[in-house]
Amino acid sequence: MIPEHGVATLVAGKAIPLVYVREGGSVFIGASRGNEEWFRQVMLSGSALLDLNGKRVRMRATLVSDPDERRVVEGLFRACFPDRFSMWFSERTKWVAMSEGAQGEGGYLPWVRDEFDAIAWDYDRHIYGNWINSYLRERSLGVLSGIVRPGMRVLDIGPGTGTETIPVLEMGAEVTAVDISAGMLTVLRSKAESRGLASRLRCLNGPAGYVLSDLAGKGETFDLVYSTYGALNCEPDLRSVALNIRDCLKEGGMCFISVYNRFCLSEAIASVLRMKVSRVVDRSRRYIPLGHSRFCVDIFSYSLAEVLSCFREHFRVERVFAVPALIPPSDFAASLDGMVDKGRLKKIDAAVSGLPLIRALGDHTAVLMRRL
């Protein structure tokens, strides 16, 4: 039996007509590309005003993040809109469940949690299926392999599904992995168990700032703290994170971070060639909302100078490099296929990544530091 479906009006600054499906006490709507503004408003507030069959109701809004639930919702929409589904929706569609009752949780961090829960089961394809993303991990693991020793206590902030965590465990370290996404940690734990590494892995679920503060309050310290490729860009106050990292490190302990940069020369050149100058302008903002970057949530961008100003008081900087430096960001990977010698390009990129000026103009800025 086909469930109730039709067109509802979402009131989010303006009236937005959206197709819906009602099933099991919930009303489902889909957010595809181009719907970023109303979607982010709904996720940040945790609720939405929906006009459904002439009745205007304030409804609780939650992102459908469980993969099985996502497949069920997608199936409902395919059944209700068979001729239009492929036109309106795609595998990147975000499904939102609306229900009457208490106000939804809302807020930035819950949104980040739900978004990464939603992509956890497909995250490895995003990394290993993109040669530029894989190159980023090659660079970071090159640094970590020079630091990690058997028995070392390591704190990994934002491990995702373990693209670096698993190799660090294989190096013999004892790893505490902190991630806001329980889904990411579930995948990571499963990988560790399958490789016989779970006895040296501890997973802590929660926002990095809160968990690090709790660890420091309990007097826990580590030999190495690292965080790479975007986790710290979901932290609105990097200075506070720097303090928490300091408090979690032993004296003389190492800290390695890589942060999405506000200024990227290769992206600027590629964007100008594509006649998309707005992307360069968007990136230079301190706060970048959904739809103005390649990330699935709002993020906070930091220049090299800003990163150093947050950490320099408590750390001695030992190395700074761009990653990648000359190679454009990962969403340009497909357009470079067949046009470049990837192996040679990566060697050149790595060779120049630490040069003055260039190191401040990469997609991410990587910094290796020692606690004072």
Image: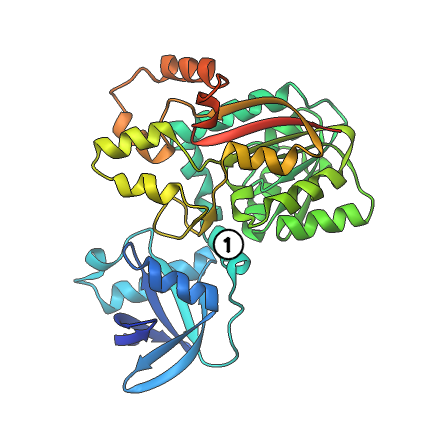
Query: Type of residue at label 1?
Result: Val
Residue at coordinates 72% horizontally, 22% vertically from top-left? 149
Q: Is residue 79 above or below residue 34?
A: below
Q: Identify the image quadrant of the N terminus.
A: bottom left
Residue 212 can be seen in this image: yes
Q: Classify residue 156 as left or right of residue 346.
A: right
Q: Does 198 appear above or below 205?
A: above
Q: What is the residue that sits farthest to the bottom in this orientation? A: 55
Q: Residue at x 64, y 28 (%)?
A: 168
Q: How is the image coloured?
A: rainbow
Residue 258, position as x, y percentages in the image: 54, 33
Q: Position of residue 135 (x, y in %)?
A: 45, 25
Rendered location of residue 211, percent (x, y): 69, 50
Most distant residue in the right direction:
219
**Which residue position holds label 1?**
112
Residue depicted at x 41% and y 13% = 348
Residue 177 place in picture, x, y as percent: 65, 41
